[in-house]
Image (spheres, rainbow, N blue to C red):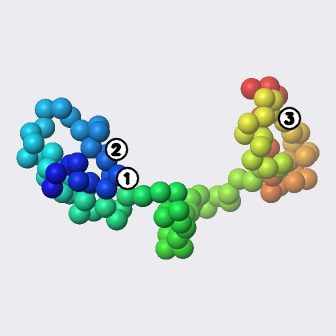
Amino acid sequence: MNPAHLPEYLQPLMKGVADDLTLRQREELAAAIYEFRDVFSSGPTDIGKTGLVKHTIDTGDQRPVLWAHGWHLLFSPVWPVYSIDSCLEFPEAACIGKGSR
């Protein structure tokens, strides 16, 4: 397949190809890309969501760590300081940090 005949959304895949490929190799690559075109996104509306795969993180026999005030703590310039008492009072919360990062 002539690389120039690829649909527009597949054209960028050919731009990064090594210069030392022969014309035949470029045509074979273009044919393979075209054959598997259904695995490439053609725009922002064809991605969607799926329920076919569920992401999990194996924590072994440990409970997942939960943050006391939400994920924004990860981006806070100063980590909160928790005392042992507050950790015992809220065992579901992770007691992190010892002051400033």
Mark found first going from the N terminus, 3 or 1: 1
Q: Is residue 98 visible?
A: no
Asked which secondary structure carries label 3, the reply is loop
Which residue is label 3 attached to? Answer: 81
- Whether residues under marks 2 and 1 lie with C-beta atoms below 8 angstroms apart, the answer is yes
**Residue 78 appears in the picture as rendered:** yes
48 horizontally vs 68: left or right: left
Identify which residue, 67 or 89, lies in the foreground. Answer: 67
Q: What residue type is labelled 3?
A: Val
Task: Give the residue number, with chain letter if any, for mark 2.
Answer: 12
Q: Are marks 3 and 2 in contact (CB under 8 Å)?
A: no
Q: In which quarter of the image is the N terminus?
A: bottom left
- Secondary structure of the residue carrying tag 1 is helix
Instruction: Tell me the element at label 2.
Output: helix
10 left or right of 44 in image: left
Q: Which amino acid does label 1 sit on?
A: Tyr
Estimate the x, y position of residue 42 in percent, counting from the top left: 42, 58
Disc 2 residue type (three-letter): Pro
Q: Please state the horizontal and vertical placement of residue 9, each as a whole percent of the image.
A: 37, 52
Which residue: 61% across, 61% down? 61
**Other residues around mark 3 within 10 Å, as few (<14) / some (14–19) / many (≥20):** few
Q: Point out the image quarter for the C terminus.
A: top right
Residue found farthest to the top: 100
Measured in 3D between alpha carbons, the distance from the residue under mark 3 to the one under mark 1, in whole angstroms, is 50 Å
Q: Which of 38 and 5 is in front in this view?
A: 5
Give the mark nearest the N terminus, 3 or 2: 2
Where is mark 1, residue-wise? 9
CB atoms of marks 3 and 1 within 8 Å: no
Q: In this view, does 41 lie above or below 19?
A: below
